[in-house]
Amino acid sequence: MAATAATAAGSGELSLQDLRDYLLRLEETIIFALIERAHFARNDRIYRRGEGSVWEASSTHSALGQQYSFLEYFLRETERIQALLGRYNAEDENPFFPALTPSSFLPPRSSANFLKPNRINYNAKVLDQYLNEIVPSICAAGDDGHYGSSADADIICLQAISKRVHYGKQVAEVKFREQREAYTQLIRARDTDGLMRLLTNQAVEDRLLRRVRLKAATYGQEISDVPRPAPPNSTATDAASAAATAFKIDPDLPERIYRELLIPLTKDIEVEYLLQRLDEQCTVAYLGPPGTHCLRAAQACFSQGEDLLACDSIDNITKVYSHANVLVECQALLADMNLSDKCVPVASTAEGAQRAAEDPHAAALVSELALEMHPDLRVLRHDMQGAGAENRTRFLIISRHLQLYVFRPSAAEQLYSLTSHSCSAAVHIGCA
């Protein structure tokens, strides 16, 4: 069924029934993934950074643990491999770490895209709701030590849920093509409530919820050929009833997850996609060179349709390049390393990375994105800004045509994540 949906999408002939058939099968993927995750305890340590995390006892990965939780690192590295093998060449796939996703070494698909080019990505919200609402509801509290298995099950759940909610873009495109005039009028009026009403088919949603609960009750039953002992003072009828209602996961939970989380997120994505559906492609200028945090902000905010206009040891370092603000933020550790008098301010961390790449006796304080764009740089020390450092950057979007852009919640969340974590937590010292 997945192949059928993909083929139809590539040929431009995708129908609403094609999508419903595929999403129906995806229900089973999600239910089985939830059942598998429920097999393990909550294991909160895999979701923490720093103190109390899985990394805490590892001196090798202590700096890494300040930047990523065990799950985040596992997910990031999984996405790196999948990206190289072409997973994110498909327009129905959306990474959780889009700014850190490498290009595939496989050629792009020859089929035409079905969707309007976009960069809508709600995975920050998917991850937040999964960790704070889904995991606590399906997993027993406690720590069973199965960290790798739990994180692996989490990734399967997250990627299946992400695919499900982001299929809202395909659903919105099909519905737009079927009722182009009605949707165009609402889009031009920026009528989000009207779009939500036109998109909603309550009868279909009600059937979906009943079906999800029935599947969860069917697939989640505890099957055994050994009769369970009857509780004390119970009748034979009570014992039979109890045995018949033993589940690996409460059937009400998948239904509630769909009703309260997945369906609302899908519809929010549908509305956001439609609000961009009539936008024309434009060129977005960002403060360069490539590798700056400004580039990451532009990537987070704008769609794929826009054109977005980079030492052997610390003892041998003669210059340390970076933006002046970064040098100030890291001054304590630079002093401890006897590098304070070797600092050279430049226009950006990306320029610092470029200069360090060209000079074997120079180093740079750079972001993780700059490291991605300069693979010849070797990291000498992570987390240069120190624990607890707070440094945030505000980005302004300036345009003569403000009607082209709708302030999108997903973009705001990505920017918040970028400014609250990446700018302060991904400062490294590296050299060629």
Image (cartoon, rainbow, N blue to C red):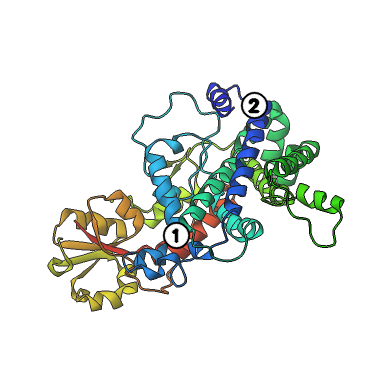
Q: Nearer the viewer, residue 180 or 171?
A: 171
- State the image quarter where residue 341 is shown: bottom left
In the image, residue 89 above or below residue 54: above
Q: Is residue 334 left or right of residue 426?
A: left
Q: Is residue 176 visible?
A: no
* Of labels 1 and 2, the one closer to you: 1
Q: Quadrant of the C terminus?
A: bottom left
- The structure residue drawn at horizontal position 39% and vertical position 57%, both measured from the top left corner, is 293
- Residue 113, image x and y in percent? 51, 28
* Along the viewing direction, whichever of 27 and 294 lies nearer the viewer: 27
Q: Which mark is residue 70?
A: 1
Residue 312 image-quadrant placement: bottom left
> Pointer 1: residues within 10 angstroms few (<14), some, or many (20+)?
many
Q: Amino acid at mark 2?
A: Asp
Q: Residue at x 32, y 51 (%)?
A: 372
Name the amino acid type tagged 1.
Phe
Quarter occupied by residue 212: top right
- SS label for mark 2: helix
Image quadrant holding the N terminus, namely top right
